[in-house]
């Protein structure tokens, strides 16, 4: 997901995800989140399009804006460890 939003993937994935602010014009708290389509089956619910969007929407914004992949990995590891301690 990090590499997708920093344009480090092939052109095949260019329009793989849709951002909420592209779907509706009014500003909301979740405007920068990924739009998640309804999936009826478990096959759809375990797809990258669904699970990747769910997980990425839960990542804090201060982690999403990091410019270095190695910094993102380190900060994410610290974040997850802190969440497990609570």
Image (cartoon, grey):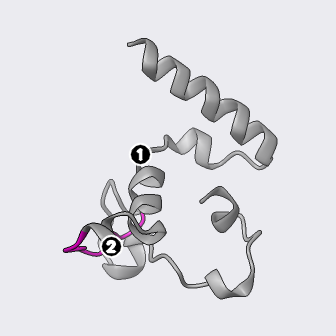
Q: Residue at x 32, y 53 (%)?
A: 29
Residue 16 position within the rendered picture, expressed as x and y whole percent measured from the top left: 53, 80
Q: Earlier in the sequence, mark 2 or mark 1?
A: 2
Where does residue 79 sit, x and y in percent of width and height? 55, 27
Q: Residue furthest front?
A: 43
Quarter holding the N terminus is bottom right
Q: Is residue 45 magenta?
A: no
Tell me if 33 is positioned left or right of 62 in this view: left
Say the numbered circle drawn on residue 23: none
Q: CA distance from mark 2 to mark 1?
A: 19 Å
Tell me, yes or no, whether the highlighted magenta stretch contains residue 38: yes
Give the numbered dot on residue 44.
2
The quadrant in which residue 22 appears is bottom left
Q: Secondary structure at mark 1?
A: helix
How packed mark 1 is, by other alpha carbons closer than 10 Å (few <14, some 14-19, many 20 or more), is few
Magenta segment's dominant SS is loop
Residue 62 image offset from top left, x and y in percent: 58, 39
Identify the residue at horizontal 51%, vertical 18% (top origin): 82
- Residue 64 in picture, x, y percent from top left: 60, 48
Q: Which residues are magenta?
A: 34-41
Residue 38 against residue 58 in the figure, above or below:
below
Is 24 positioned to the left or the right of 6 in the image?
left
Does residue 38 appear to the left or right of 86 in the view shown?
left
Residue drawn at point x = 38 percent, y = 13 percent: 86
Label at residue 58 = 1
* Vertical order, 14 against 42 (above or below): below
Mark 2 Cα shell of 10 Å, populated few (<14), some (14-19), many (≥20): some
């Amino acid at each position: 997901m990090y590499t997708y939003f920093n344009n480090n993937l092939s052109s095949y994935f260019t329009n793989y995800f849709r951002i909420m602010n592209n779907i509706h014009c009014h500003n909301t708290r979740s405007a920068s989140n990924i739009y998640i389509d309804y999936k009826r089956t478990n096959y759809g619910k375990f797809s990258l399009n669904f699970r990747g969007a769910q997980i990425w929407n839960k990542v804090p914004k201060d982690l999403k804006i990091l410019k270095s992949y190695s910094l993102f990995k380190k900060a994410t590891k610290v974040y997850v460890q802190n969440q497990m301690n609570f």
